[in-house]
Image (tube, helix red, strand yellow):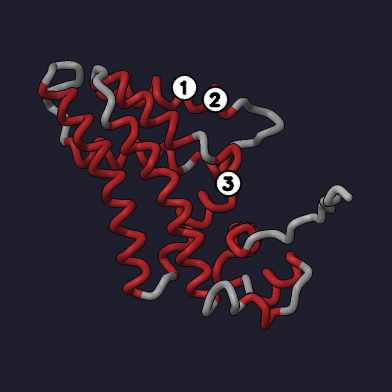
Amino acid sequence: MAHQETTTARPPTRQKKRDKVIDAAARVFAERGYHGASTQDIADLLGMRQASLYYYFASKEAALEEVCAVGATGFLENAEDIAKRDIAPDVKLRALCVAHTMPIENRADYVKTFLHERKWLPTESRRRVGRMSRRIEAIFERVIRDGIRNKVFRNDLKPRLAVLGVLGMLNAVPEWFDTEKQSLSDVAENLADLAIAGLRG
């Protein structure tokens, strides 16, 4: 008699479960802030016991670090990919600005937590996340310096201040962007236009 295979639904992998837990933590931190959030809030969102969360992270602080790290990694990977491209500095800066803005579309909770809650991390955790943030800033700064050197941008610019200005503008988007009233891609392109126009003078 031929062997009859039966198919059963596979249980979610541990990594998928962990991803769901971290997604829930990101949502709670983004909505309530670090001090207003609790591990019970995260457990309630997932419909699980609070004690079960500690299988995935050791503490609320550890959950915050992981959420911030995921948020920073998304920005960093996009920036590093663009930095490798053989394109003009202004084209590269445009791509950086757009890539820095677009994660709001599908990772808004991670972006908001990274931008606003990482200051509450313990010192060592904050330093680890901060190193990723500084690598992102360094990529923007190299592009701006290349633009000055190649006479694409004004030669009276102070690159470090220019980076802080551009990133400050981009990082403010989650505070006012409304998905029902605006197109994020249009917003990203318009902000890139503003950044490049300002650097060209």
Q: Of residues 77 and 160, which is closer to you in this image?
A: 77
Look at the picture and state if 105 lies above or below 112.
Answer: above
Q: Is residue 71 visible?
A: yes
Numbered disc 1: secondary structure = helix
Measuring from the top left, give residue 96's x and y in whole percent: 36, 31
**Tag 3: residue type?**
Ala
Q: Measure how far apart labels 1 and 3 are at the Cα level.
A: 18 Å
Q: Measure how far apart labels 3 and 2 are at the Cα level.
A: 14 Å
Q: Which residue is mark 1?
A: 189
Look at the picture and state if 28 lies above or below 143.
Answer: below
Q: State the residue at coordinates (54%, 43%).
A: 174
Q: Is residue 43 left or right of residue 55?
A: right
- Checking the image for residue 185, the label placed there is 2
Numbered disc 2: secondary structure = helix
- Disc with the residue nearer the chain's start (1 vs 3): 3
Q: How many marks?
A: 3
- Do the residues under discs 1 and 2 have CB atoms within 8 angstroms? yes
Measuring from the top left, give residue 173's x and y in whole percent: 51, 39
Q: Is residue 37 left or right of residue 148?
A: right
**Tag 1: residue type?**
Glu
Q: Measure how far apart labels 1 and 2 are at the Cα level.
A: 6 Å
Asked where in the image residue 124 lies, by quadrant, the reply is bottom left
**Tag 2: residue type?**
Ser
Q: Is residue 119 left or right of residue 175?
A: left
Q: Which residue is mark 3?
A: 108
Q: State the residue at coordinates (12%, 27%).
A: 156
Give the crowd class for mark 3: few <14, some 14-19, many >=20 residues within 10 Å. Answer: some
Numbered disc 3: secondary structure = helix
Look at the picture and state if 53 lies above or below 93.
Answer: below
